[in-house]
Amino acid sequence: MYRQIIQQIEYAILSERIKPGDKLPTIRSLAIELRINPNTIAKAYGELEIRGILITQVGSGTYVSDKKPIQERDERNRKIQEVIGRFVQEMQNLGVGEEELKQLIENYFV
């Protein structure tokens, strides 16, 4: 479970949903929100702090550092495929065909 928390935080940083200097939820509040043991959150935060991705300031909280997570090429490709898969499935659910989808993507970047 703690590895999933690490991956989600790293993905949020890489996708810029959270940025350097942003304060993360407290261990206790995140444990309550996710309904898991606080030690699991503490372990994930600790691992990210060892990697230099998070900084904990006693009495103030845990913050995102300036250091970006290193994303392995295979992990990046897996994540890309996952995102594309969800996107294509959503488009199919909306009735968008392959040719229309290609046109929509081309028009998006114009």
Image: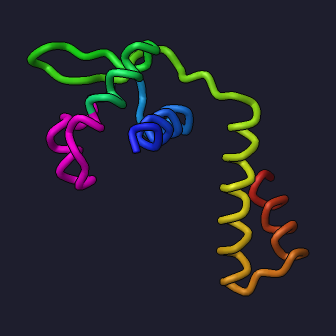
Tell me if 100 is positioned left or right of 48 in this view.
Answer: right
- On the image, the x and y values in percent for residue 35 come to 23, 55
Whether 106 is among the magenta residues is no
Q: Is residue 109 above or below residue 89?
A: above
- On the image, the x and y values in percent for residue 70 come to 61, 22
Q: Residue furthest left?
A: 59
Whether 35 is among the magenta residues is yes
- On the image, the x and y values in percent for residue 96 come to 77, 81
Tell me if 25 is positioned left or right of 72 in this view.
Answer: left
Q: Is residue 52 above or below residue 43?
A: above
Q: Main secondary structure of the magenta part?
A: helix
Q: Is residue 62 above or below residue 102?
A: above
User: Hey, which quadrant is residue 26 in on the image?
Assistant: top left
* Image quadrant where one finds the N terminus: top left
Q: Nearer the viewer, residue 43 or 59?
A: 43
Q: Residue furthest bottom?
A: 95
Give the magenta-colored segment's residue range.
24-41
User: Hey, which quadrant is residue 27 in on the image?
Assistant: top left
Tell me if 67 is positioned left or right of 44 in this view.
Answer: right
Tell me if 73 is positioned left or right of 24 in this view.
Answer: right
- What's the residue at 20%, 39% (across, down)? 38
- What's the residue at 70%, 75% (across, down)? 91
- What's the residue at 46%, 43% (across, down)? 4
Q: Nearer the viewer, residue 92 or 6?
A: 6
The image shows a total of numbered marks equal to 0
- On the image, the x and y values in percent for residue 51 come to 46, 15
- What's the residue at 43%, 19% (across, down)? 53
Q: Is residue 85 above or below residue 68?
A: below
**Colouring style:** rainbow
